[in-house]
Amino acid sequence: MREDGRLVAGRYRLQFPVGEGGMGVVWRAIDERLGREVAVKLLRVPAVLGARQAEQGRQRMLREARIAARLQHPNAVGIYDVTDGASGPVLVMEYVPSRSLAEVLAERGALPPQEVAGIGAAAAAALAAAHAAGIVHRDVKPGNVLLGHDGAIKITDFGISHAAGDVTLTSTGLLGTPAYLAPEVARGAAPGPAADVYSLGTTLYAAVEGAPPFGAGDNPIAQLHRAAAGGAPRSRHAGPLTPLLEQMLRDDPAGRPSMGHVAADLAELADRPASALAQADTTAIAAAWRHGAGAPPTRMDGQPVLAPQRAGRPVSLLRRHPGYLIAGLAGCLLLGALLSALLTTRSGNTSAAPPGSTTRVPSASHPSTVIAPALLRQTVTGYYAQLPDHPDRAWTRLGPALQSQGQDSYEQFWHAVKDLQVVGQPQARGNAVTVAITYRTEDHRRVQETHQLGMILRNGVPLINADHLLSAQTSSNNGHGHGNGGGGDGDNGGG
């Protein structure tokens, strides 16, 4: 029976399959109600189960999918809808034109450590957000890490593997993929966040070595026994990633770092210039995260976690600006200000700047990183598509400088806005995007604005980190308008 062209759940028109696994088939489809591309996964309840077990499995798949749908993170494939189709549960997800990390490794072989660190940082950020929301992935592996054609990095199949695994436990005895299982899970323990840390470690190990720690043979039972025994071998090609991988692959779950720490350290390694990586003291890197502060907070709707400030890490402002050491009162005053700023940095002062001010926040991307224009335009268009109805989602697409101005005032502004539209095509130049928007206020005034948005990369994801209002014009109900024609920083965080 041909599936292409079939309408699922009354609105999703299947086009062609884009992937298949033990849990079902993924199709590219069109949501005819909203006119957008989506990925539709037709979940498969194992045929070996009896009618009662099959029904339990179906219900659990739906329940786990609804739990996973609560997670909103730029590095996690979004779940749009969970429904029950004629042939079983249906999961409707964000469509990501991509290849999996498994496909890339099969084609290219082992990858350079810095590239692996960037991929791992994005995946770890999404997993940290999931853990904060009480969601454990349970099947982290290269096949579930998607590398988008636009440069985005996303992890998929949150929670669904657990739903499928539970109902097949008696028939297969397996949860997850044996080559990437944590030892405690291979021995029958329930998977927890530490198990995800281990599985991500095996995934990164496979990326730099070309194969997971215990091999990737065809015998899953043999792989399961090797995973249960533990004792992952030391990576030979991980370079500066080696200390972190060793910690992630500890047999004892209590000895592994949190996923938040993993995300922060991987982001830091990914952002270092290649020359600095080649000269890195890997022992110092390992000690730095061990003695750092507690795991940085991760919001369910938040951005990838920021690297915590660590003792001895701040760069001396005096060393960066020796010209400030001049004679005279002005020089002394300026030097005092610089010393004060340095002491504030070392004391961990993170007080937020007042709304509308410009805050210098360390970027997680190297200053020379140039973001592809198509990706910049897509990011800005996607940002405004969330507004004004979903400011909480739009907030996750802002960088730290804009987020420092506070989410409450940001959402308060957008709750007073109606009918926003992007006028024309956003124009990208360098890492800046110029965009024109129009919207209506609660008192029925029509506002037209032009913004220049400064973009950064954090863990491979473009974020809006600066917003400069170039011009604005307001039209009242009687049709007369006025424009300020001026420039300056917008105070609403991204338009």
Image (tube, rainbow, N blue to C red):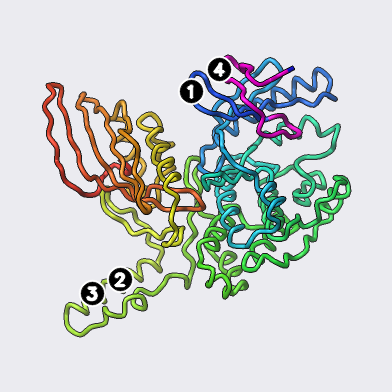
The residue to which callout 3 is attached is 334
Q: Are marks 3 and 1 in contact (CB under 8 Å)?
A: no
Horizontal side of residue 338 vs 62, given as left or right: left
Q: Residue at x 13, y 30 (%)?
A: 481
Q: Amino acid at mark 1?
A: Gly
Give neighbour class at mark 4: few <14, some 14-19, many 20+ (Cα, 10 Å).
some
Give the Cα distance between marks 4 and 1: 10 Å
Q: Quadrant of the N terminus?
A: top right
Give the mark nearest the N terminus, 2 or 1: 1
Give the mark nearest the N terminus, 3 or 1: 1
Find residue 382 and report its horizontal and vertical position in percent.
42, 37
The residue to which callout 1 is attached is 35
Give the Cα distance between marks 3 and 1: 58 Å
Give neighbour class at mark 1: few <14, some 14-19, many 20+ (Cα, 10 Å).
few
The residue to which callout 4 is attached is 11
Q: Nearer the viewer, residue 469 or 326?
A: 469
| Magenta span | 2-25
Q: Which mark is residue 340?
A: 2
> Tag 4, which secondary structure?
loop
Tell me the mark number nearer the camera, choosing from 2 and 3: 3
